[in-house]
C-alpha cells in the first residue's frame, strides 16, 4: 500500500518545478506523461525534488488524484 510522507504531500501542492518544459508549474499539476518521461530517461533527480516527483507519479499513475484535489483545496483555505 502506498503511504506517502505527509510533509511531501503538502509540498507537492506548493512547490513549483524549478526547470524544464514545465518550469514554474506546481509539481502536483505536472502531467503523468512528463513524469513517465523522467522514468524512461534514467529516473527522477536525486534528493528532495526527486522524492516529490516520485510521489506525484505514484499518486497519478495509481488513480489517486483525489488526494491532490483535497490537498489543493486545503492549501487554498490556508
Image: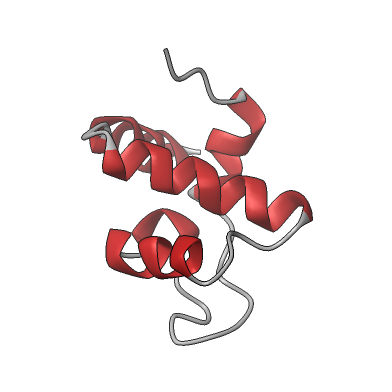
Residue 35: percent from left, percent from top: 41, 62
Vertical placement of residue 78 versus 13, above or below: above
Quadrant in the rendering for residue 62: top left
| Residue lying furthest right | 47
Residue 32 horizontal side relative to residue 9, left or right = left
Q: Nearer the viewer, residue 59 or 41?
A: 41
What residue is at 54 percent from the left and 53 percent from the top?
Answer: 53
Residue 78 horizontal side relative to residue 34, left or right = right
Vertical placement of residue 45 versus 21, above or below: above
Vertical placement of residue 28 versus 72, above or below: below
| Residue lying furthest bottom | 21
Q: Is residue 26 visible?
A: no
What residue is at 30 percent from the left and 59 percent from the top?
Answer: 32
Quadrant housing the N terminus: top left
What residue is at 62 percent from the left and 37 percent from the top?
Answer: 8
Q: Nearer the viewer, residue 42 or 34?
A: 42
Q: Nearer the viewer, residue 55 or 17?
A: 55
Quadrant in the rendering for residue 59: top left
Q: Is residue 14 visible?
A: yes
Residue 47: percent from left, percent from top: 78, 53
Amino acid at each position: 500500500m502506498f503511504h506517502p510522507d505527509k510533509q511531501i504531500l503538502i509540498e507537492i501542492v506548493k512547490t513549483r518545478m524549478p526547470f524544464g518544459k514545465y518550469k514554474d508549474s506546481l509539481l502536483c499539476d505536472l502531467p503523468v506523461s512528463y513524469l513517465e518521461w523522467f522514468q524512461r530517461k534514467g529516473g527522477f533527480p536525486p534528493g528532495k525534488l526527486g522524492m516529490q516527483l516520485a510521489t506525484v507519479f505514484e499518486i497519478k499513475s495509481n488513480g489517486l488524484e483525489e488526494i491532490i484535489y483535497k490537498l489543493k483545496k486545503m492549501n487554498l483555505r490556508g
